[in-house]
Image (spheres, rainbow, N blue to C red):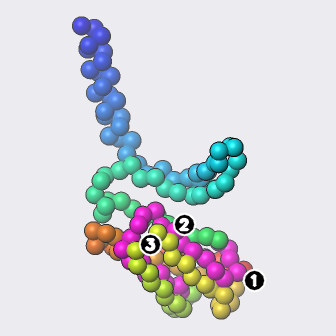
Amino acid sequence: MKHLTFLIILFVYASAGKAQSQQTVCGIFYSYDANGERIQRKYNCIYDGPAHPTDKPLYGVIYPNPTAGPFAVELNEFVLSVVMTVSNINGEQLSSVSRSQCWEISGDISPYAPGSYIVTVLVTREDETQASQSFTLIKDE
Protein backbone atom coordinates (compact mmCIF):
# COMPACT_ATOMS: atom_id res chain seq x y z
CA MET A 1 0.00 0.00 0.00
CA LYS A 2 2.88 2.37 0.78
CA HIS A 3 4.36 1.74 -2.65
CA LEU A 4 1.07 2.50 -4.38
CA THR A 5 0.65 5.76 -2.44
CA PHE A 6 4.22 6.73 -3.25
CA LEU A 7 3.69 6.05 -6.98
CA ILE A 8 0.48 8.09 -7.05
CA ILE A 9 2.16 11.04 -5.33
CA LEU A 10 5.14 10.77 -7.68
CA PHE A 11 2.85 10.71 -10.72
CA VAL A 12 0.87 13.77 -9.53
CA TYR A 13 4.02 15.83 -8.90
CA ALA A 14 5.59 14.74 -12.20
CA SER A 15 2.44 15.81 -14.09
CA ALA A 16 2.35 19.17 -12.32
CA GLY A 17 6.04 19.72 -13.07
CA LYS A 18 5.49 19.03 -16.77
CA ALA A 19 2.62 21.53 -16.91
CA GLN A 20 4.83 24.26 -15.49
CA SER A 21 7.80 23.46 -17.70
CA GLN A 22 6.10 24.45 -20.97
CA GLN A 23 8.34 27.19 -22.29
CA THR A 24 10.48 28.29 -25.17
CA VAL A 25 14.09 27.18 -25.09
CA CYS A 26 16.40 29.09 -27.40
CA GLY A 27 20.02 28.30 -28.00
CA ILE A 28 22.72 27.06 -30.31
CA PHE A 29 22.27 23.48 -31.45
CA TYR A 30 24.84 21.38 -33.30
CA SER A 31 24.45 18.61 -35.88
CA TYR A 32 27.06 15.89 -36.23
CA ASP A 33 27.89 13.40 -38.97
CA ALA A 34 28.43 9.66 -38.43
CA ASN A 35 32.09 10.22 -37.47
CA GLY A 36 31.18 12.66 -34.73
CA GLU A 37 32.36 15.72 -36.66
CA ARG A 38 30.27 18.85 -36.27
CA ILE A 39 28.63 19.71 -39.59
CA GLN A 40 26.15 22.42 -38.65
CA ARG A 41 25.77 25.12 -36.00
CA LYS A 42 22.30 26.61 -35.82
CA TYR A 43 20.50 29.00 -33.49
CA ASN A 44 17.02 27.66 -32.90
CA CYS A 45 14.09 28.05 -30.53
CA ILE A 46 12.20 24.97 -29.41
CA TYR A 47 8.68 25.76 -28.26
CA ASP A 48 7.02 23.48 -25.73
CA GLY A 49 3.91 25.45 -24.94
CA PRO A 50 0.23 25.69 -25.79
CA ALA A 51 -0.81 23.88 -28.94
CA HIS A 52 -2.79 26.80 -30.34
CA PRO A 53 -0.62 28.55 -32.98
CA THR A 54 -1.69 32.06 -31.97
CA ASP A 55 -0.10 31.49 -28.57
CA LYS A 56 3.16 30.55 -30.22
CA PRO A 57 5.56 33.47 -30.53
CA LEU A 58 7.39 34.22 -33.76
CA TYR A 59 11.15 33.78 -33.48
CA GLY A 60 13.44 34.58 -36.34
CA VAL A 61 17.19 34.74 -36.75
CA ILE A 62 18.87 37.24 -39.04
CA TYR A 63 22.27 36.34 -40.47
CA PRO A 64 24.95 37.33 -41.22
CA ASN A 65 24.93 40.37 -39.01
CA PRO A 66 26.87 42.58 -39.67
CA THR A 67 26.84 42.14 -43.43
CA ALA A 68 28.22 43.82 -46.52
CA GLY A 69 24.95 43.32 -48.40
CA PRO A 70 23.13 39.99 -48.65
CA PHE A 71 21.32 38.66 -45.57
CA ALA A 72 18.55 36.21 -44.65
CA VAL A 73 15.91 35.85 -41.96
CA GLU A 74 15.18 32.28 -40.88
CA LEU A 75 11.85 31.70 -39.11
CA ASN A 76 10.99 29.13 -36.44
CA GLU A 77 7.93 27.93 -38.34
CA PHE A 78 6.65 27.34 -41.86
CA VAL A 79 4.42 30.26 -42.91
CA LEU A 80 1.96 30.88 -45.71
CA SER A 81 3.43 34.26 -46.58
CA VAL A 82 6.01 36.71 -45.33
CA VAL A 83 6.67 40.35 -46.14
CA MET A 84 10.07 41.75 -45.19
CA THR A 85 10.72 45.49 -45.16
CA VAL A 86 14.03 47.26 -44.73
CA SER A 87 13.97 50.76 -43.23
CA ASN A 88 16.66 53.18 -42.23
CA ILE A 89 16.99 54.46 -38.66
CA ASN A 90 14.73 57.42 -39.50
CA GLY A 91 11.89 55.03 -40.37
CA GLU A 92 11.96 55.55 -44.13
CA GLN A 93 11.14 52.33 -45.95
CA LEU A 94 13.91 51.47 -48.41
CA SER A 95 12.79 48.11 -49.79
CA SER A 96 10.20 45.40 -49.43
CA VAL A 97 10.32 41.71 -50.36
CA SER A 98 7.52 39.16 -50.14
CA ARG A 99 7.50 35.39 -50.40
CA SER A 100 4.93 32.66 -49.91
CA GLN A 101 5.14 29.24 -48.25
CA CYS A 102 8.59 29.40 -46.75
CA TRP A 103 10.85 29.09 -43.69
CA GLU A 104 13.29 31.77 -44.80
CA ILE A 105 13.41 35.05 -46.71
CA SER A 106 16.47 36.88 -47.98
CA GLY A 107 17.33 40.43 -48.93
CA ASP A 108 20.20 42.67 -49.94
CA ILE A 109 21.31 46.04 -48.58
CA SER A 110 24.32 46.44 -50.90
CA PRO A 111 23.03 49.66 -52.52
CA TYR A 112 22.75 51.46 -49.20
CA ALA A 113 25.37 53.30 -47.15
CA PRO A 114 27.07 51.59 -44.20
CA GLY A 115 25.10 51.96 -40.98
CA SER A 116 22.18 50.47 -39.07
CA TYR A 117 18.91 49.34 -40.64
CA ILE A 118 15.64 47.99 -39.25
CA VAL A 119 14.40 44.76 -40.84
CA THR A 120 10.77 43.88 -40.08
CA VAL A 121 9.08 40.61 -41.05
CA LEU A 122 5.30 40.24 -41.09
CA VAL A 123 4.12 36.65 -41.46
CA THR A 124 0.75 35.06 -42.14
CA ARG A 125 0.52 31.64 -40.54
CA GLU A 126 -1.34 28.61 -41.84
CA ASP A 127 -4.33 29.43 -39.61
CA GLU A 128 -4.46 32.96 -41.15
CA THR A 129 -3.16 34.69 -37.99
CA GLN A 130 -0.39 37.24 -38.32
CA ALA A 131 2.77 37.94 -36.34
CA SER A 132 5.74 40.24 -36.78
CA GLN A 133 9.29 40.67 -35.55
CA SER A 134 11.89 43.41 -36.04
CA PHE A 135 15.69 43.15 -36.19
CA THR A 136 18.53 45.65 -36.26
CA LEU A 137 20.88 44.90 -39.15
CA ILE A 138 24.31 46.50 -39.42
CA LYS A 139 25.88 47.11 -42.81
CA ASP A 140 29.65 47.36 -42.79
CA GLU A 141 31.89 48.39 -45.66
Sequence-earlier tag: 1 or 3: 3
3D distance between C-alphas at marks 1 and 3 = 30 Å
Residue 77 screen position, x and y as percent: 42, 64
Residue 27's x, y, as percent?
Answer: 56, 52
Q: Is residue 127 left or right of residue 133?
A: left
Give the secondary structure at mark 2.
strand
Q: Quick one: label 2 or label 3, which is nearer the N terminus?
A: 2
Identify the residue shown where x is 26% and y is 14%. Answer: 5
Eye-nearest disc, 1 or 3: 3
Q: Residue furthest left?
A: 1
Residue 75 placed where, x, y %?
47, 67
- Residue 134 lies in the magenta-colored region: no
Furthest-right residue in this view: 141
Quadrant the C terminus occupies: bottom right
Which residue is labeled 3 in the image? 102
| Disc marking residue 61 | 2
The residue sitting at 64% across, 80% down in the picture is 70
Asked where in the image residue 112 lies, by quadrant, the reply is: bottom right
Q: Residue at x 36, y 34 (%)?
A: 17
Q: Secondary structure at mark 1?
A: loop
Magenta range is: 65-87
The answer to whether 132 appears left or right of 88 in the picture is left
Give the total number of marks visible in the rendering. Answer: 3
Identified by mark 1, the residue type is Glu
Amino acid on which the number 3 mark rests in the picture: Cys
- Tag on residue 141? 1
